[in-house]
Image (tube, rainbow, N blue to C red):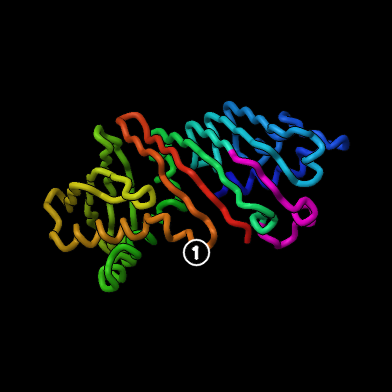
Amino acid sequence: MEFLTILLSALLIFISPAGLVIDRAAENAIRSRLESVEELKVRVDNTPSYQILQGKIERVRIAGRGLRVTPDIRIAALEVETDPIDIDIQSLRRGGKMPLLKTLRAPLQAATRVVLSQEDVNQALRSPEIINRLRNLGSRVLDVSEAEQLQRYEIFNPKVEFLDNNRARLQVEIQERGEPERLVILVEAGIEVIDGRRLQLTEPVVLVNGETAPARVVKGLVVGISRRLDLQNFEKTGILARILELKISPAQLEMAAFVHIEPR
């Protein structure tokens, strides 16, 4: 969604006095919203060209490598291809507090492919923002009493390892505030896509300091994560997303997805 916001924000820059779309201007607009970019190509198709003045674009294609969204978050590769776009240029130009997606006059559809390297994911996991999100995720997938206990702990040294057969291993250290000892928690599981919208952990293994965690904790973790990682949660906001393919290998995670956004 963040990259889609960048795309819509940049649309105004695409419009030259002659009403033509300039691919280089589009690239520069997107680059200006990122920390750094190793490679970026943008192709905006529009025939006839005057339609851009009406807020209509036939198709936008974006291909990038080494896109650093923040100092700690990097995308190894990203491809985006949209269907026709129809937006209210005047509303977008006025800006203000109006959400950009409210400028849509017709549904927006896009296909995307994202590649994340293991190294990049681990760099992101070390950032304070992601560590805080991990803590919040833990609070939401556990029951109330366990979630309250989790808030007493600090998280250190999260690390993920991509494995064969769509499996991944996450190791993290937690330390109760005021206590000297740390617990090492290891979670290994396969990741399966259910109905294109929900991620489910398969054959999970959870160890705490090398000891197998209680079955109820493992079950609660699996059910909670599956519930939180359900793309159907976004549908009430007008966003329909489906995962078309998910591949995990020792080198990287690759995902292809489809997004349909209704005007708000």
Q: Vertically, is 25 above or below 134? A: above
Q: Which quadrant holds the C terminus?
A: bottom right
* Residue 91 lies in the magenta-colored region: yes
Residue at horizontal 69 percent and vertical 48 percent from the top: 86
Of the pair 177 and 61, the residue shown nearer to us? 61
Would residue 191 be found to the left or right of residue 96 on screen? left
Is residue 119 something one can see in this rendering?
Answer: no
Q: Single out the residue that lies furthest toward the bottom.
A: 145
Is residue 22 something one can see in this rendering?
Answer: yes
Secondary structure beneath label 1: helix
Q: Position of residue 241 (x, y in %)?
A: 47, 50
Of the pair 207 and 49, the residue shown nearer to us? 49
Residue at horizontal 33 percent and vertical 60 percent from the top: 227
Q: Position of residue 178 (x, y in %)?
A: 29, 64
Disc count in the image? 1
**Residue position for label 1:** 236
Of the pair 135 and 48, the residue shown nearer to us? 48
The magenta segment is 82-99
